[in-house]
Amino acid sequence: MIEEKTSVDEIMKQAYRQGILIPAFNVAYIPMIKPIIESLKKHRTFGLVEVARPDVEKFGAGSFRKVAERYYALGERIFTRLHLDHVPVIDEDGKKVDWQYLIKLALELKFDSVMIDGSRLSLEENISVTKKVVELAHNCDVPVEAELGAVLGHEEGPLPPYEELFATKRGFTGIRETERFAKETGVDWLSVAIGNVHGAISGVAKDEKKISARLDIEHLKKLVEVSKIPLVLHGGSGIERSSIMQAIQNGISKINIGTSIRQAYESSLRSHPDDITIAQDKVGQEMERLIREYELEGSWDILGKCISE
């Protein structure tokens, strides 16, 4: 059974072994935390509550500290863990980020896992930075997620046509690079690019629907073979369901979801600006849809049974 003391890394490893998906939900606004947790509990689904820099800087999450304080104040740790998403070394605007400060802050705030994103660096630099974060976090018994390849969509301006991106494998995570990266860094989880695209944050309207994306499953299989660690998919909310289900069966253990629940919240507030509870209900409804769509109901029980054995 999953208890409060159960390591999120142990849970993720079981998900990897059993072919079970762990969804991770981005908190763009503080009031979203409550319906995310309540929905996971209601459907006995294990998931992560996560926050990234864009949630703080471009939306309404406030700060990493505020998210952590609200998360822990709700007191529900059985069905969830708290994850720090996307701490870039170089951000989408080409600016350097004080990643060491942010990682140390997350460890101080008792985040259960952290992510360093050195994907805009050279391979050697990405390996070097990730190794430093792994050493820092592992000293606190906290697992680390990293990124290799370019999950596009956060950059300024329009992207080329999606079919062009997919056909040319632009930004896809390399096979040889993945093998070397996993061995040399000791990273616990790896975010990969196999056709996925982030929800557009810069350069286009925030409420625009995402393009319909798909995944290169054969490429994924090769990444799984050489990495031998749980793989992560960012930009999950715009991918065809059939592609996601195939990816789960072939090595994707965690998927980040942000766009659809954020849009549900924002859309409701535009209609009912003085009633946050209605917006929270809309987030809960979207959470339930996602849990059904990806067949996640009861995952907490399955994972807990495997851990107990």
Image: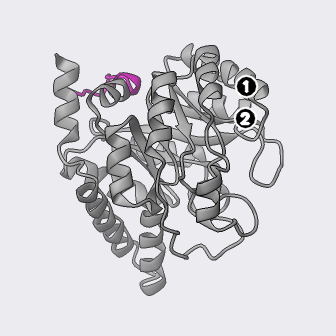
What's drawn in magenta, residue-wise?
2-10
Nearest the eye: 65 or 199: 199
Residue 75 visible at all: no
| Quarter of the image where the N terminus is located | top left
| Quarter of the image where the C terminus is located | top left
Residue 224 placement, left or right of 85: left
Pointer 1 and pointer 2: residues touching (CB < 8 Å)? yes
Residue at 51 percent across and 23 percent down: it is 227
Image spot of residue 304 (x, y percent): 20, 28
Q: In the rendered structure, which disc, 1 or 2, sits on the residue that comes first in sequence?
A: 2
Image spot of residue 151 (x, y percent): 62, 49
- Does residue 125 sit above or below 220 in this rendering? above
Residue at 57 percent across and 16 percent down: it is 186
- Does residue 175 sit above or below 242 in this rendering? above
Number of labels in the image equals 2
Q: Residue furthest right?
A: 95
Which three-letter amino acid code belongs to the residue tagged 1? Answer: Val
Image-quadrant location for residue 97: top right
Residue at 41 percent across and 54 percent down: it is 33
Nearest the eye: 36 or 14: 14
- Badge 1: few (under 14), some or many (20 or more) residues near its Cα, within 10 Å? some
Residue 282 placement, left or right of 111: left
Q: Which residue is mark 1?
A: 129
Residue 33 placement, left or right of 130: left
Q: What secondary structure is found at the residue carrying circle 1?
A: helix
Q: What secondary structure is found at the residue carrying circle 2?
A: helix
Residue 295 visible at all: yes
- Does residue 231 sit above or below 143 in this rendering? below
* Numbered tag placed on residue 21 in the rendering: none
Image spot of residue 303 (x, y percent): 23, 30
Q: Which residue is mark 2?
A: 99
Colour treatment of the image: one colour
